[in-house]
Amino acid sequence: MLNSSTIKTKTADEYRAEAKRARIVGGLKTAGVYTMLTLWAIAVLFPFFWMLLTSFKTFGSYNAERIPSFIIRHATLDNYISAFTEVNLGGYILNTLVFTVVTTLLMVVVSVLAAYAFSRLNFKGKEIVFTLFLALMMIPSELVVITNFVTITEMGLRNTFTGLILPSVTSIFYIYLLRENFSQIPDNLYLAAKVDGTGDLKYLWRVVLPICKPTVITVLILKAIECWNSFVWPRLITDNEAYFLISQGIQTIRESGFGRENVPAMMAAVVIVSLPLIVLFIIFRNKIMEGVARGGSKG
Amino acid sequence: MEKNNLKAWLYLAPAIIFLGVFLVYPLVDVFIYSFEEGFNSASQTYLGIGLYNYSYVLRDPYFLKALGNTFILVFITVPLSTLLALLISLGLSSIKWLRKLFQTIYFLPYVTNTLAVGLVFMILFQKTPYTDGLVNYVLSWFGVQAIDFIAGPYWAKMLVLSLYTIWTVLPFKILILTSALASVDETYYQAARIDGTVGARMFTRITLPMISPSLFYLIITGFIGAFKAYSDAVALFGTNLNSAEMNTIVGYIYDMLYGDGGGYPSFASAAAIILFVIVLTITSINLIVSRKTVHYGGGVGNA
């Protein structure tokens, strides 16, 4: 699209002026973009900053602040001590660790076996079963949680780890993800292993898993994060504080622990709960973000 | 290749048992529950089959409140968060310096505990006898009277809930949109530049059509996720959401199931199926709209 103004020849000065204008406009645009990005970064980081800051304030000095202060006059670690002594945060964390480790490991074993069957073994009805699995992926957890609640209650498994863990084990999405990955391994390896007389389990353990280690680790991390933060199911199935996980623990601390007004101690508890995941995220940032981008969504 | 039927089913057995017991059976059961009238969970008996549970739920003021709250929340947060994520992702894709750092920071809320960070939001917005809180302090610079966002007027509570929801859903949206933007072939832009295409046109004619599948995916999952809002509300207003006037549909389901007003799996089931029907309807509408607007496939065709 040429119009008359571009056809008209310009002098060197005009070109220079135009280039300068373009630079200024471009510079302003970049400055605007960075301003917006920085503002959102502050919005994301501020709650973390505030919990950390408040957790070091003493109870007295926090309550004396009519106007919230960005300065700590007397830094203290007392809040961290009371988080473990006055409320049962240590117990909540231990429960969450047990729940997370057992659920995640069970999930990986179940999913790896199923994914292996779908990717490597031949059997009647394979396509149909796999399609059924994918269809089940669409079922919202809110629909099934009601019966699961009744089932677990009737089995007398309320306030047990078994009751917490069993309904949380299966994740069809991870079976799908692992199957896709397993299918990429060339058939030749399998045939060679067969010739050597290697059984399927041994082949899975010695060949498939080492090759697919990155995906398996991604799946492990995503499931562990999900377990660490799970709230709805644990809240339904436990009312004995000895079995609370951290989400429910935090809720209990907020509603009855420390006395309502001890905000610094609450913030110390929140820091302790948030820290492990932030560390995990910093170590495995790329794996986590890639895994989520491939189809994870929260909840 | 040989068929190894038995072995394959053995490998699949654990997954099938888990899925059968905790996913397929409950799915069937929830429909049965929802039609059993006067179900008594102690004696496992019911009076009859019918639509009473649905009519009860649909006339329950708590459910109607939860329904209203959920719809308000959905129609505030889904458009706003999608738009904001698009703006931020466009910004991210136009810079090089500090880009990785920004991306890492923006993803943080995804890996944090909703209840834990919600507590911090509550502290920031809360007005107590001791202090008006940080947010009110900042607002006072602009001459705004202190408002209790946590236990005060309805619109203030809805505002905080919307803000917190947007804060928690943005990481996923930004991640999806930045990777969609990164995968747009640079040659389209080069070709357009040679043709003398200017910025805004470049955006509506190339960028938008090319990322429209991702955008559409985010809108669908955004609607579904927002209709299931619950944890965010608990994090801000505590577990007694009915008295805070901030209950959501999912919150209503859980309250019916368990807790002070609980013990009514039939009402919970009816409410869950109503929610499911709403989500299905909205998703279908989205799908119909998308057929006209979303651009799938490789080339830059008619968007």
Image (cartoon, coloured by chain):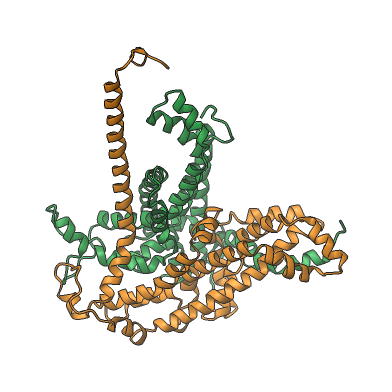
Left or right of B161? Residue B204 is right
Residue A191 at x, y percent in the picture: 84, 60
Tell how many labels.
0
Residue B267 at x, y percent in the picture: 49, 62
Q: Farthest front residue?
A: A12
Left or right of A273? Residue A12 is left
Residue at 66% from the left image edge and 65% from the top image edge: A111
Q: Farthest bottom residue?
A: A85
Q: Nearer the viewer, residue A233 or B244?
A: A233
Work out whether B224 lies above or below A114: above
Report the chain shown in orange. Answer: A
Q: Quadrant of residue A250?
A: bottom left
Q: Nearer the viewer, residue A20 or B253?
A: A20
- Look at the image and tell me whether residue A82 can be seen: yes
Residue at 20% from the left image edge and 67% from the top image edge: A70
Report the chain shown in green. Answer: B
Work out whether A109 lies above or below A241: above
Q: Nearer the viewer, residue A260 or B37?
A: A260
Q: Quadrant of residue A170?
A: bottom right
Residue A273 at x, y percent in the picture: 40, 74
Residue at 16% from the left image edge and 60% from the top image edge: B146
Left or right of A29? Residue B189 is right
- Look at the image and tell me whether residue A255 can be seen: no
Residue B238 at x, y percent in the picture: 34, 68
Q: Quadrant of the N terminus of chain B?
A: bottom right
Work out whether A83 lies above or below A47: below
Residue at 36% from the left image edge and 56% from the top image edge: B167
Work out whether A47 lies above or below B182: below
